[in-house]
Amino acid sequence: MPELPEMENYRRLLSQHIINVPITGVTVNREKTINVETNVFTEALLGARVVFVERRAKYILFHLYDGRRLLLHLMLGGMLFYGTEEERPERSTQVELAFGDHILYFIGLRLGYLHLVSVKEGEALMGKLGPELLDRRMTLERFEGLLKKRRGALKTTLVNQQVFAGIGNCYADEIAYEAKLLPTVLIQTLTKDSIARLYKAVRKVLTEATEIGGYMEIPFMTGDMVTGSYNDQCKVYDREGEPCLRGGGTIVKVELSGRKVFYCPDCQLEQ
């Protein structure tokens, strides 16, 4: 599932290409992907302009000129591609928005969605999310405060969108590895030093992953050499049975609350 780095990478790229460009075509191939009738969706978007692209957690909000929003959540397997009809990937698309001769393809939205919402509806949905971990206001002191009353495993806490916004399975494991902590360690047992190490790991992993485009499967557009570069940088995620890059251990996979967890039992500890 695309997480904060992937969605922030998309936000940056979208902002470079579609701001204030009129939407000249709307194609809906799967009605379940949108939340209103196809004709209502089409009429609302034809001729409209996106004036701002915002990311919040794992969501992207396209701010339209009339104040409404397009709310995108890619869920599992969703991705974006921007290009001409000749460049389109050989994948099924659920929605297509044309900006002149270039089209923004919404791909793999079998579980994901693109909803047309009002400002009030968008704010209500975003208001349920926890704070952004890369926000400049997210100091160590604030981070400690958010963890102070929490109970449960580290990974479960990191992926809880009402505690922290934007982290999913991949980066929770990578953050725990960077902090040299077991993903299964209980939050309430962490020392002050462990929390400080975790805070640094959060900032480091998310920043680095964002700068190199996250782990998306396909580029955002032809010539895009950034998107997906983090694929080869994961230290533990999806590396079961492979050697730890920090020592002589072997990466293992377990299950925690229905989620896959990857870690090194040799160098990741309880404190």
Image: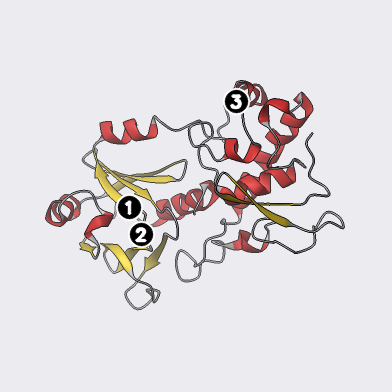
Label 2, on which residue? 109
At mark 2, the secondary structure is: loop
Q: Are marks 3 and 2 in contact (CB under 8 Å)?
A: no
CA–CA distance between discs 3 and 2? 33 Å
The residue indicated by pointer 3 is 150
Compared across the picture, whether 235 is left or right of 9 comes to right
Q: Amino acid at mark 2?
A: Leu
Residue drawn at (49%, 53%), measured in percent from left and top? 2
Residue 172: image quadrant is top right
Determine which quarter of the picture holds residue 118: top left
How far apart marks 2 and 1 lie (CA) works out to: 6 Å
Residue 265 in picture, x, y percent from top left: 79, 49
Please name the residue that numbered disc 1 is placed on: 113
Residue 247 in the image, given as x and y percentages of width and height: 86, 55
State the colouring used for the structure image: secondary structure
Give amino acid for label 3. Arg
| Residue 43 locus on image (x, y percent) | 13, 53
As rendered, which of 130 and 203 lies closer to the eye?
130
